[in-house]
Amino acid sequence: EVALEEITWLQKLWKALGRTRRSLLNQLKAIVGQGPLNQQAVDEIESMLLQADVGVEATDRVIEALQSKLRQEALPPEQAIAYLKQILREILEEPFSQGYPITFAPEKDTLNIWLVTGVNGAGKTTTIGKIAHLAQKSDYRCLIAAGDTFRAAAVDQVKVWGDRTGVEVVANPGKNTDPAAVVYDAIEAARSRNTELLIIDTAGRLQNKKNLMEELNKIRRVIDKRAPEAKIESLLVLDSTLGQNGLRQAEVFSEAAQLSGVVLTKLDGTAKGGVALAIVQKLGLP
Ligand SMILES: Nc1nc2c(ncn2[C@@H]2O[C@H](COP(=O)(O)OP(=O)(O)O)[C@@H](O)[C@H]2O)c(=O)[nH]1
Ligand SMILES: [Mg+2]
């Protein structure tokens, strides 16, 4: 049985992905046309995937699978589309067969710490608002750490989400404070309140990989020292409208932090949701 709220949420998600779905499916129907799949159609599918930001590696993999299937049997339009769907799904589901959980939720009665990283404007704070809302509704004791101390407005912004969701925000009022110090305070607060989910906002400045690594490592060290028993997840937030640039960001962040998964934002504003496949293929992250 599915709760009403969940249905609404799934409908929203379905609608948000509508642009990508319609764009791909309409193109695909036009390409496969009436007859069985031929070489020209395969070439057109290849450019369609590349244009949808699926990336070279994942596209090659799809096309190779399609070619080898075609050597065995003819593919009428409907089967061609079904087979293509199957390959794309296989790529997206691969992380789950590698041990990543299919549903991603904090463990009850434990301190879970979710570190949220990504470049400025990716959608970190908005995502934290969404997660906090969901956690609050699901009866988790939740806390947010305002770890983006780089921009003054960032702290206010995360506080707005705290007010909206009824989740307390731990922030440092000083200017240019060390994010690791905020994380330290937040962990102390989490301990005394038996918090189950502590979400950490970060600045994730990407001026160079070394600085980014140092900043994230410092936060990580504070967590390891002050909350060694905590269950830590590190989420990279990526703007899906950035295409191949997003993939570059993902590579840098995955080198700087041990990532648990990628959050793709702004899929509602693009027909290029294929970047999800590029990321999964490249990084093996769900
Ligand atoms: N359409 C759309 N806009 C989003 C989404 N997530 C974030 N945004 C917008 O992107 C902008 C930057 O988001 P913000 O959370 O401040 O990014 P941050 O700098 O990474 O914390 C804001 O204007 C958000 O409203 C999304 O999923 N869809
Ligand atoms: Mg922010």
Image (cartoon, helix red, strand yellow):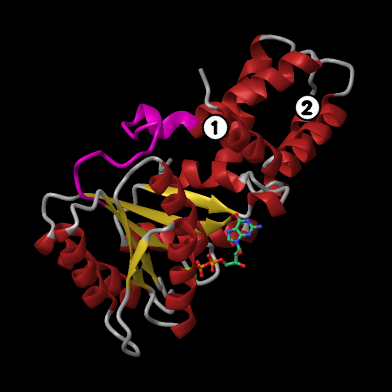
Q: Name the image quarter holding residue 14.
A: top right
Q: Which residue is mark 1?
A: 6
**Is the residue 195 above or below the residue 80 in the image?**
below
Left or right: residue 254 versus residue 78 is left
Name the spot of residue 69 as percent of width and height, x first: 63, 17
Residue 270 x, y percent position in the rendering: 71, 52
Horizontal side of residue 118 vs 274, given as left or right = left
Q: Residue at x 71, y 54 (%)?
A: 269
Residue matched to label 2: 39
Residue pictured at 23% horizontal, 67% vertical: 186
Give amino acid for label 2: Gln
Q: Is residue 97 magenta?
A: yes
In the displayed orientation, state which residue is furthest to the top: 73
- Secondary structure at badge 2 equals helix
Location of the C terminus (image quadrant): top left
Dot 2 or dot 1: first in sequence order is: 1
The boundaries of the magenta stretch are 93-112
Q: Quadrant of residue 144?
A: bottom left
The question of residue 222 being in magenta is answered with no
Q: Nearer the viewer, residue 111 or 245?
A: 111
Residue furthest toward the bottom? Answer: 175
Badge 1 element: helix
Say what amino acid the circle numbered 1 marks: Glu
The quarter of the displayed image where residue 21 is located: top right
